[in-house]
Image (tube, rainbow, N blue to C red):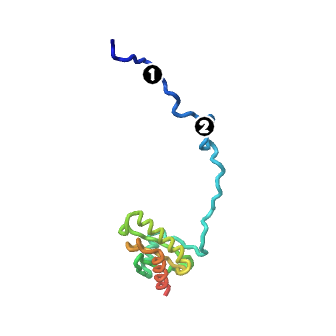
Amino acid sequence: MNDEAHVPAEQPGSQAPARFPRPHGDGRRPQGDRGAPQPRPQEAVRLTSQEIGKLTRRAEFLAANGGFRAPTPGFVLLVSKRTDSDPAMRLGLTVSKKVGNSVVRNRMKRRFRELARLVLPEAGIAGADHVLIGRQSGIERDFAQLADDLRRALARAAK
């Protein structure tokens, strides 16, 4: 006799399909309507009454470079009084590639924006451009120390 077992040519199908379709689609997610949109604020809410503008053009940064300079351990503050009659303060931020990679530079700029939001309304000079230039030692410097440095530098610039 032959030691080989008889193998039928037709293979049996699987027991059950791998996934049963639901009768009305997948009940875990809405199919069509995503629901009513949630209300969102239409404009940014400001905590301070004084508006702080933004320096955007290179010429504005160069003009601020000709004004008062106050070096601190974490940054250099440049203050330049404008000739126009606009009493609004403006802020410019600069952090070069010498300070670190993009993650470090963006982190420093976020810290500087928060510093300006907290300190400039109370100690800033009206009608002036303020430029913060980041330094390498400003990365690890404590936020409270940076705020004190900015207040002292603004007091020197106001004299």
Badge 1 local density, few (<14 within 10 Å), some, or many (20+)?
few
Examine the rendered structure and indicate whether residue 106 appears above or below residue 75. above
Q: Position of residue 4 (x, y in %)?
A: 35, 17
Badge 2 marks a residue whose secondary structure is: loop
Report how far apart the C-alphas of labels 2 and 1 lie in the structure: 32 Å
Closer to the camera in the image, 45 or 148: 148
What numbered label is drawn on residue 87? none
Camera sees residue 86: no
The structure residue drawn at horizontal position 61% and vertical position 41%, both measured from the top left corner, is 27
Q: Position of residue 51 (x, y in %)?
A: 58, 73
Q: Position of residue 33 (x, y in %)?
A: 64, 45
What numbered label is drawn on residue 11? 1
What numbered label is drawn on residue 25? 2
* N-term mark: 2 or 1: 1
Q: How many marks?
A: 2
Badge 1 marks a residue whose secondary structure is: loop
The structure residue drawn at horizontal position 48% and vertical position 68%, both measured from the top left corner, is 110
Drawn side of residue 71 relative to residue 13, left or right: left
The structure residue drawn at horizontal position 50% and vertical position 74%, both measured from the top left corner, is 115
Quadrant location, the N terminus: top left
The structure residue drawn at horizontal position 55% and vertical position 73%, both measured from the top left corner, is 52
Badge 2 local density, few (<14 within 10 Å), some, or many (20+)?
few
Examine the rendered structure and indicate whether residue 67 appears above or below residue 10. below
Q: Residue furthest top?
A: 1
Camera sees residue 26: yes
Given the image, on which type of amino acid does mark 1 rest? Gln
Given the image, on which type of amino acid does mark 2 rest? Gly
Drawn side of residue 137 relative to residue 122, left or right: left
